[in-house]
Amino acid sequence: MPRVSDEGLRAGETKMREAGLAEEAIASFRHYYGQLAAGEEGVVRESEIEPVEELPAIGDLETDDAVRREALDTAVILKLNGGLGTSMGLEKAKSLLEVKDGETFLDVIVQQTLELRRRESARLPLVLMNSPHTRDDSLAALARYEDLPVDVAPDFLQNRIPKIRADDLQPASWPADPSLEWCPPGHGDVYCALATSGMLDELLDRGYAYLFISNSDNLGAVLEPRILVWMAAEQIPFVSEQCRRTEADRKGGHLARSGDGRLVLRETAQTSDEDKDAFEDIERHRFFNTNNLWVDIAVLKELLERREGVLGLPMIRNSKTVDPADSSSPAVYQLETAMGAAVGLFEGSRAVLVPRSRFTPVKTTDDLLGLRSDAYVIDEHRRVVVSPERTRGPLLVDLDPDSYKLLPDFEERFPQGPPSLVECDRFTVRGDVEFGRDVVARGRVEIDRAGEGRTHIEDGAVLEG
């Protein structure tokens, strides 16, 4: 770590003020810059934590109709919507990508919200945390639904912070594209952004008490009244939804307990090399965070005020280059936080075990193909669920990244839509393969045409492992 003075911090603060960012956001940057300058790496060591053995399951939660009605009318659905889907070659909000039956993520989310309102006779506003890159298109998409607006604004903006050069800890400069000098401070920024945008006060003024927060690319994350009733009845300030880890989840963050018994979240980027084996041990660390979170709004407000606007989530130091597409560009640090890590900051936080159906994120075109296929359907409540005709375990799709990673390439190779995967366990493709109409895959299917040029699978073909 290079020796630094206050010069880098002052330069970063000046840059943020000139960009019009709120003082609370600058204070948060100051907090994490200080940790970076002190040589901290944001590591959570295995010796500092203990595994979580068991969690209450959602199916065991009791319901109370009176609590349910009151709590639902004071609940808010908040979706993180700042992502552009650049990993799939998108240049617009990922939530505007067609995901199922001609509808986008946002279409499905809106329909889920309206169906919940109708069924529960509650206000249930839908609020987006946007970035400047996703705001206009996303709000235009919401505007098509005339019955969606209620009594709060439809969105607020996430903050941004300077990328920090790894060699001298100065704010990065990149005249070729000044927008690359900035980065979002991770989804943990949601708590600060709620305050700096005025949304937190607006929700309290309108009589709202609970936030259900999730990512817009996870259509399994539908507001669940049983969790809300549990939270309200037992006055729990923060609830984190967890799933049981499988071999496919070894690389993802997991739940644990600190030495004082508090729940904590450890991400991959917070794990040292010597703790890697323990981190990936799914029998030791059994639960992973879905990023479906429930927050008591008044408690969040009080906690932010007590901490002078800086919630103090654990820092994640991500090493990047200032231009992600140019590995020769200067090395930088992106100072980020994870919103799920707030489970360790709220006194009395709890976690609940939920089924895998509440965690169906789309991070890659592999995920997208599975969701678009007949292995999933949209039910009468507009939830995306595993098809009732599917009797197998989790579907695993593994497409050749050279041919399918970017959405235009992916779409070109499935011009007639996805193959039938309802009877498929694993669908693996290597090489450049184009699929015709009504292709059916059953069991474990592996297609290997690497190095053979473009191969075409004919209409109606039945592929069996």
Image (spheres, helix red, strand yellow):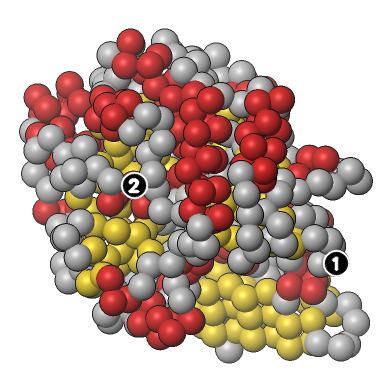
**Disc 2/disc 1 C-alpha distance (Å):** 35 Å
* Residue 62 image-quadrant placement: top left
Q: Residues within 10 Å of mark 1 (few under 14, many from 20)?
A: few
Residue 177, x across and y down, in percent: 86, 43
Amino acid type of disc 1? Ser
Sequence-earlier tag: 2 or 1 = 1
The tag on residue 342 is 2
Q: Nearer the viewer, residue 139 or 18?
A: 18
Reading the image, the residue beneath label 1 is 328
Q: Residues within 10 Å of mark 2 (few under 14, many from 20)?
A: many
Report whether residue 458 is seen: no
The tag on residue 211 is none
Against 337, is 247 above or below? below
Q: Nearer the viewer, mark 2 or mark 1?
A: 1
Residue 302, x across and y down, in percent: 27, 27
Residue 256, x across and y down, in percent: 27, 66
Residue 405, x across and y down, in percent: 73, 66
Left or right position of 143 against 457? left
Left or right position of 360 against 454? left
